[in-house]
Image (cartoon, rainbow, N blue to C red):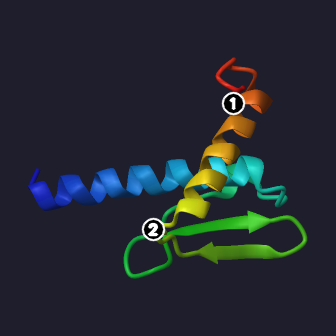
Amino acid sequence: MSRKTLTALMKKKHEIGVFRRFAKVSGLPIIPESIEQPPEPEPDILCEIIGEGRVAFELTRIDDEAFRRMWVQMQEREAIQSGDGKGP
């Protein structure tokens, strides 16, 4: 497997993980089983939202301090909701 292919696979794995965490804490009625990653050049994520149908998401990286704080809080809420004891 080439380095480029391995990097692309790692990116896709990261994206799906980030989106699944987002889906859990977003409050959107996303059907978890519907989350998928179509091949390029399609959007990064396709899923079904109850009452909306199929929705596409394009992920991007934001390097902003306020966003980082919000992201940490979102992960803490997820930890509390899942009961893994990592929350505050």
Where disc 2 sits, the SS reads loop
Residue 26 coordinates in the image, percent (x, y): 77, 56
Q: Which quarter of the picture shows residue 79?
A: top right
**Residue 73: quarter of image:** top right
Q: Which residue is outermost to the front?
A: 65
Q: Amino acid at mark 1?
A: Ala
Mark 1 = which residue? 79
Nearest the eye: 86 or 40: 86
65 lies above or below 1: below
Q: Quadrant of residue 53?
A: bottom right
Classify residue 83 as left or right of residue 67: right
Residue beneath the point at 84% across and 56% down: 27
Where 38 sits versus 12, above or below?
A: below
Q: Residue at x 22, y 56 (%)?
A: 7
Residue 55 position, x and y percent, is 69, 75
Residue receiving disc 2: 61
* SS type, badge 1: helix
Question: What is the count of numbered marks?
Answer: 2
Amino acid type indicated by mark 2: Arg
